[in-house]
Amino acid sequence: MSLALLLLVATPALAESRLPDFTELVDKAAPAVVNISTSRDVERSMTSSRQFGGQEVPEIFRHFFGDRIPMPPDGGPNRGDTPRRSLGSGFIFDEDGYIMTNAHVVKEADEILVRLNDRRELKAELVGADEKTDVAVLKVEADNLPTLELGESTDLKVGQWVAAIGSPFGFDHSVTSGIISAINRTLPQDVYVPFIQTDVAINPGNSGGPLFNLDGEVVGINSQILTRSGGYMGLSFAIPIDVALDVANQLREEGYVSRGWLGVSIQPVSKDLAESFGMEQAEGALVAELDPSGPAADSGLQAGDVILEVNGQEVDRSTTLPRLIGETAPGEDVELSVLRDGQRETITVEVGEWPNAGPEQSDGDSVRLGIVVQPLTEMEKRRLGLEHGVRIAKVDPTGHAAAAGIRPGDVLVRLGQQPVEGPQQLKEMLTSLPDDRAVPVLLNREGRAYFVALQLGHDD
């Protein structure tokens, strides 16, 4: 009996001793974790965000449960001049004042404010942002800034304890903890990031904050949640710090991120397709189409090939291929192991650079409209059924284009009665357009033709 009582008393104490203590980690790391707030003029239609708990929930949180917000039937602007505040988190990773956060936290911000642990508020400059990985770098001017130590996300294991510090719902320096529940997780529309999946409680405001291992090293950036309500439901996802740091360094040095590109359109290999190809299991990426101007066009790769490996690394599913190619430096050769007519073949391709990787064109060609444009690839033209046009990458919320209801992602097909062939031609066209007169603009929005009336004002 006495032995049984001793075990009952000892067991809770033993369990408690095995639980991690985060107090030292928090004391050391908290000073370098910051709160980020932004202001911008936005459309009242709420087409790019939804409200939850009185705060803005960025669009990225809606990848998993769709857009249930009704839009105006004509997609019109219904603009207002009220600035909206967006709360997020970030952390100082360089003593010169460089801060890492999520791209969606600072998207389209007119002003960015960073609040430090000592209550100082500093204006931040956006060094660069990469929407494909959801990483952004900010710069503040201050001395003696604390920094965080960066770890290695490649060493992470499922079941490992991790902790997050951030500002959920604006509550600064809140700490939550949990374990890693999966690694190398691919999410819809986010094929360039092998996410760390955790059960750490993450809510709006945590975005951009650091994820720590028990050594107090940053191993990820908290980025997304899987939710039907807008709040935490048990699954959260972080960008591995190795991926984030590579992106951050490119943004600091070049202002943009260079990615490898094959110039192919791919699709998953279903069970039925696998059987039709004589495969034992469904795996790989099926090449559906090749861009005639892309790097793979002259390599011997063909539509109908199933890509199974890239430089010896397995392509277990189609979403793995863009990440493996994107991590390859443009100009390098990759060996693709493909299945063709039931036989394995090896094809060497010199990887190109993603067509829209370079600095976006925003000089005199589009400043008058308040837009930033990018050229269309041949594959994009075929997919959209267009012969010409330019993709709109950014829209100044105070410009003429925003007033007309033009959005990022639209393709500008025709301005007035003239087709838009490219960014340079658009610049030339704008010089001849009259002021104070509406001009019809033909857009392609998600594959659908759409006209808007663009009112040009005097250039100041």
Image (cartoon, grey):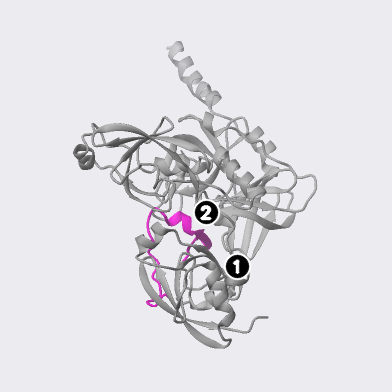
Q: Nearer the viewer, mark 2 or mark 1?
A: 2
Mark drawn on residue 253: none
Q: Relative to residue 121, is residue 143 depicted above or below?
A: above
**Quadrant into which the N terminus falls:** top left
Which residue in the protein does label 1 denote? 40
Residue 404 appears at what percent x and percent y? 50, 78
Q: Is residue 285 above or below residue 124?
A: above
Magenta residues, start to end: 48-75
* Crowdedness near tag 1: few (<14), some (14–19) or many (≥20) residues, C-alpha within 10 Å: many
The amino acid type found where label 1 is placed reads Arg
Residue 162 x/y as whole percent: 54, 35
Q: Is residue 291 left or right of residue 17?
A: left
**Label 2 element class:** loop
Q: CA distance from mark 2 to mark 1?
A: 18 Å
Q: Residue furthest bottom?
A: 437
At x 37%, y 58%, the residue is 66
In the rendered image, residue 56 lying in the magenta stretch gets the answer yes
Q: Earlier in the sequence, mark 2 or mark 1?
A: 1
Q: Which one is nearer the viewer's eye here, 241 or 383?
A: 383
Residue named by callout 2: 131
Instruction: Say if the magenta span includes residue 354.
Output: no
Amino acid type, mark 2: Glu
- Residues 227 and 396: in front is 396
Total number of numbered discs in the rendering: 2
Q: Position of residue 282 (x, y in %)?
A: 27, 37
Which residue is at a point 63% across and 68% down the rendered structure image? Answer: 363
Q: Is residue 286 visible?
A: yes
As helix, strand or loop, the secondary structure at mark 1 comes to strand
Question: Quadrant of the image for the C terminus?
Answer: bottom right
Q: Residue at x 50, y 58 (%)?
A: 58
